[in-house]
Image (tube, rainbow, N blue to C red):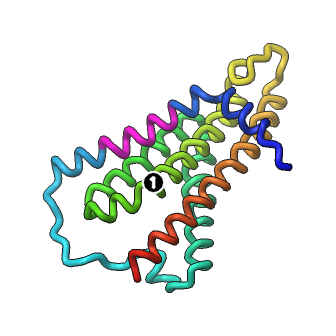
Amino acid sequence: MFDLSPYFKLISSRGRLLALMNFVFFASVFAVAIASELLLPPRLYSGWQARFPEIIIGNNFLIVLLGIFLSNLVLSAFVVVTLPGFVFFPISIAMLLFRGFLWGVFLAFQPTWLLLAAIPTVVLEGEGYALAAVAGTVVGVSWLKSKWIFNDENITRVEAFQKGLKECLVIYLLVGTILLVAAIIETVTLEMVIR
């Protein structure tokens, strides 16, 4: 049987950081959605139109699912949120805030029924992005403040960076799992909306 205890131990050791990342993402989504509703003029709806990925790759369930999953995992989570944190850890937080801003603007202009249908996807993808930001922050801090991130006075920057990368890989197993479930839900939702 698959042992989940290392994942729970890792998440509990980074619980405060994960809580901060969740707050950053979901608070920015909520604040931007409310601000957009209050400050921007309402859009008129003439019906819902298919957007990416349905127009580009058609209605093949598996292709849409893989497209959404790989786009969210590789581009949105790793390239946009995690990788910049490797260089300078606050950039992961800033990019997570930016992702929340984008989601907030997008959700503000959707009809209520579509907003309600998108909530499971938003929650799961948000959690995936929050974990991705934790991974980027841990690796970024590991080579800047190695003793602080791992609470070890004898650890060198190289050892801390290697340990941070290993932790990043473990976190990314969770990120991948969460984003896969989110992609399945999003694809099913799109199938229901399009049909």
Name the element at disc 1.
helix
Up-down: is 171 above or below 19?
A: below
In the rendered image, residue 87, in percent from the top left (x then y), is placed at: 63, 40
The spot of residue 53 in percent (x, y) is: 48, 76
Identify residue type, mark 1. Val
Q: Residues within 10 Å of mark 1 (few under 14, many from 20)?
A: some
Residue 96 is left or right of residue 37, and the answer is right
List x then y, in percent, for residue 150: 74, 23
Looking at the image, which residue is at 43% across and 75% down? 192
The residue under label 1 is 122
- Looking at the rendering, the stretch of residues picked out in magenta corresponds to 20-31
Q: Eyeballing the image, is 190 above or below 111?
A: below
Asked whether 60 or 192 is in front, the reply is 192
Q: Position of residue 182 (x, y in %)?
A: 55, 59
Q: On the rendered structure, is 167 left or right of 56?
A: right
Left or right: 11, with 123 as reference point:
right
The one nearer the camera, 167 or 8, is 8
Residue sitting at x 69%, y 26%: 13
Residue 22 magenta: yes
Magenta span dominant secondary structure = helix
**Is the residue 83 above or below the residue 194 in the image?**
above
Q: Is residue 139 magenta?
A: no
